[in-house]
């Protein structure tokens, strides 16, 4: 099995060349998640929730239909925003308050997206496998998100 670190190192290079200020922010956001999704068979759903007025709103995603709005503190996404850290949930069935958009989801990782020192949203990734995400995913997804934020101009980005 190819080491996830090798896949992520390739992804860092791929996304660096894929993301550009010359194209629409929404296109960059979509290609970012598409590149990650096509690199890992363990992913069942990947997408963004963006923060506005104490609520998280569904952004671009790949996967099944998902919940539109999540309050801060609710579910894994809302908890990640409340705590300001990446959360890894090895078994979503055992996570109190987990929001099951897809009953098949068994594990999840949620990483906050920081822009100018503030959380602007989260990247949420689900899997149909238990224990699909670990410290390697956390480290590299955070690196990938830093790269995304560095390369995109979010100053005129309005989610609503
Ligand atoms: N499971 C998430 C909700 C979003 S879906 O997974 C797409 C949560 O508990 O916050």
Image: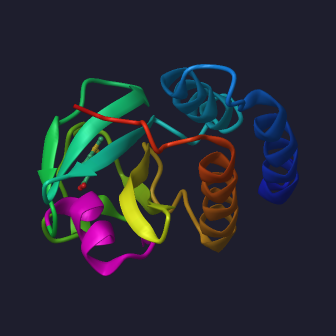
Which residue is at a point 40% across and 28% down the rendered structure image?
A: 60
Farthest bottom residue in view: 83
How did the renderer colour the structure?
A: rainbow
Q: Which residues are magenta?
A: 74-88
Residue furthest toward the front? 156
Residue 160 picture quarter: top left
46, 31: nearer the viewer: 31
Which residue is pictured at 60% across the width and 28% down the height?
28
- Give the prevailing secondary structure in the magenta stretch: helix
Indicate the position of residue 119 as horizontal and vertical percent values. 38, 64
Residue 132 place in picture, x, y as percent? 54, 57
Query: Which of the 4 image quarters holds residue 18?
Result: top right
Residue at (78, 54) in percent of width and height: 4
Residue 90 visible in the displayed image: no
List x then y, in percent, for residue 126.
42, 46
127 to the left or right of 93: right
Query: Is 4 on the left-hand or right-hand side of 66?
Result: right
Count of residue discs: 0
Can you tell which quarter of the image residue 22 is in? top right
In x, y percent, where is residue 1? Answer: 84, 48
Q: Is residue 80 visible?
A: yes
Toward the viewer: 28 or 136?
A: 28
In the figure, 2 relative to 76: above or below?
above
118 or 127, nearer to the observer: 118
């Amino acid at each position: 099995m190819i080491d996830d670190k090798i896949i992520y190192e390739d992804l860092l290079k791929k996304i660096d060349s894929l993301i550009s200020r010359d194209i629409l922010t929404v296109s960059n956001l979509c290609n970012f998640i598409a590149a990650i999704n096509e690199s890992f068979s363990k992913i069942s759903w990947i997408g963004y929730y963006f923060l506005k007025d104490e609520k998280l709103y569904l952004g671009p995603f790949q996967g099944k239909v998902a919940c539109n709005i999540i309050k801060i503190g609710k579910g894994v996404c809302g908890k990640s925003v409340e705590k300001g850290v990446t959360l890894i949930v090895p078994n979503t069935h055992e996570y109190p308050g987990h929001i099951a958009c897809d009953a098949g989801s068994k594990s999840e990782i949620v990483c906050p997206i920081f822009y100018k020192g503030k959380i602007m949203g989260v990247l949420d990734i689900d899997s149909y496998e238990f224990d699909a995400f670990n410290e390697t995913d956390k480290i590299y997804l955070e690196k990938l998100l830093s790269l995304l934020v560095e390369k995109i101009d979010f100053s005129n980005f309005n989610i609503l």
